[in-house]
Amino acid sequence: MTDRVILHVDADAFFASVEQITNPFLKGKPVVVCGLPLEHGVVTAASYEARPYGVKAGMPVAQARKLLPDGYFVPVNIPKYLFFSTRLLSIYLQMTPRVEAYSVDEVFLDLSGVADPWKQAVELKRQIAQETGLTVSIGIGPNKLIAKIASDLDKPDGLTMVLPEQALQVLGPLPVERCPGIGPKTAANLKALGIVTFSDLAQVPLAKLRWWFGKNGEKLYWAARGVDETPMVLLDQLPPLKSKGHEITFDQPMRSVEAAQAVIWEISGRLGFEFRSQQRLAGGIRLKVKPVGGKAVTRQTRLLAATADERVIAKTAFQLFRQGNFTELRGLGIYGIYLVSSVKDQNQLHLFPEDIPGEERLQTAIDHLKQKYGEGIVVPALNLLSSDFKGSGKG
Amino acid sequence: MFGWEVVEVIEEIGEDVKVLASFVNGKLQPVIFKWRNRTYQPLTIASSWSDYEGQFKRVYFSVLTDQSNLYELCFHTRNFQWCLVRIHHD
């Protein structure tokens, strides 16, 4: 495994950069991409020009407006970003078939055996800039961990190579938060133990880390030494695209939007539970509506990030529902489409359970209850509305 | 109060427009468009992208006509109709 050469390619301020490319007036200006509604949403991305003002992703737009009153606030445009993401992917695939799509704007490329990976990376940056106008930051390392950390060392438009023999020297002074998978809570726990940098972490014996952090202690031990043998999850290794869903046919016509919303939540809850149980994520949602006296119609959309979260499924399905002007329904169905495995994400995004967001932990707790007592044991309050409509399920 | 500048920068339009287009190297390119009785030309294409509404492709173009405005045009393959989606004011 020591002769691996992995590139981590990260598109710089991706959403904001796409907005600047598609609107030349925004070039060089502080651009803030916002979720909708614009007045009450959160910041999705900030351009590098906006970041010195303290604007960052996840911040309420109102707060960002106070920090940056002269900024250019633009609404998020997911289809546009997916288009550019796909273009990037096609460029990566010209270089190597060994591509792992880590997220919408990040990939790992396996260039093991390539004579001059630095030269390849320079050429890749040039090609991306020429064909898309985007800049990327690239990290080159002997594994995914070091490549990802390296890409973060020089941004934007950077290129950093860390040779195996340099790994400890480069990692040593870095704060442990730079390690993918170590979130603020674990970092705080480590800090309380006097461990701030990778060097500090490397001083701690394996037995002690195991004692403190259980099985995750071993991951920490090896991460401190720059050791990572996580394999690439190539595009063709993903499970074949499939869909899974449920339909409900009503005994009597359903006429209110509120009742439809409740049914959507009910089906979404069931789907989300099934996906999580089966370690699946839906990359898109398809809604099927059967109007009274008409043929069934379907609408579908891709999601920015694959999910098993019933709230995302329900919200997306309801958005699709609102696009139609339905008055009387005899049935409704929701399908998760473009299904992928969630195993990779669980392993890579959350090394430590305490870093899993509270909502996700809540979801896990609810799933345990459902597994023990049945699916009906916990339901959203909104679902109580749908009990007014008796129906039969399918799927 | 909030959103005042947003409205100034991006103006949502969503109106059908007439477009004269050409195919260059197999690619669709708008050349002239007419909106509210005014003709806009020449058009400089800043960027283009596409998405799907169901099975139908929509092709978007951000085009410049002068130094102060950028127009986002959309060609919908469902009905072969052009639409002026929004205007970005400088």
Image (cartoon, coloured by chain):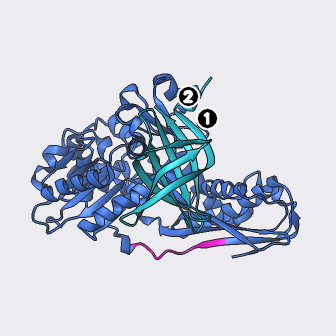
Chain colours: A blue, B cyan
Indicate the position of residue A235 as horizontal and vertical percent values: 37, 70
Indicate the position of residue A214 as horizontal and vertical percent values: 37, 54
Q: Decide if residue A376 is on the left or right side of residue A343.
A: right
Position of the N terminus of chain B by quadrant = top right
Q: Nearer the viewer, residue A251 or A72?
A: A72
Q: Decide if residue A394 is on the left or right side of residue B17.
A: right
The residue lying at 64 percent from left, 71 percent from top is A245
The residue lying at 54 percent from left, 27 percent from top is B5
* Residue on which the image places disc 2: A62
Share a chain, discs 2 and 1?
A: yes
Question: What residue span does the magenta drawing correspond to?
Answer: A238-245
| Image quarter of residue A273 | bottom right
Q: Decide if residue A260 is on the left or right side of residue B75.
A: right
Q: Is residue A43 above or below residue A118?
A: above
Which amino acid is tagged 2?
Ala
Indicate the position of residue A201 as horizontal and vertical percent values: 25, 44
Among the two numbered marks 2 and 1 on one chain, the one whose residue lies closer to the N terminus: 1
| Image quarter of residue A393 | bottom right
Q: Which of A379 and A391 is in front in this view?
A: A391
* Residue on which the image places disc 1: A40
Which amino acid is tagged 1?
His
Q: Are marks 2 and 1 in contact (CB under 8 Å)?
A: yes
Indicate the position of residue A322 as horizontal and vertical percent values: 72, 54
By secondary structure, the bulk of the magenta-drawn segment is best described as loop
Instruction: Kindly state the secondary structure of the residue where label 2 is placed.
Output: helix
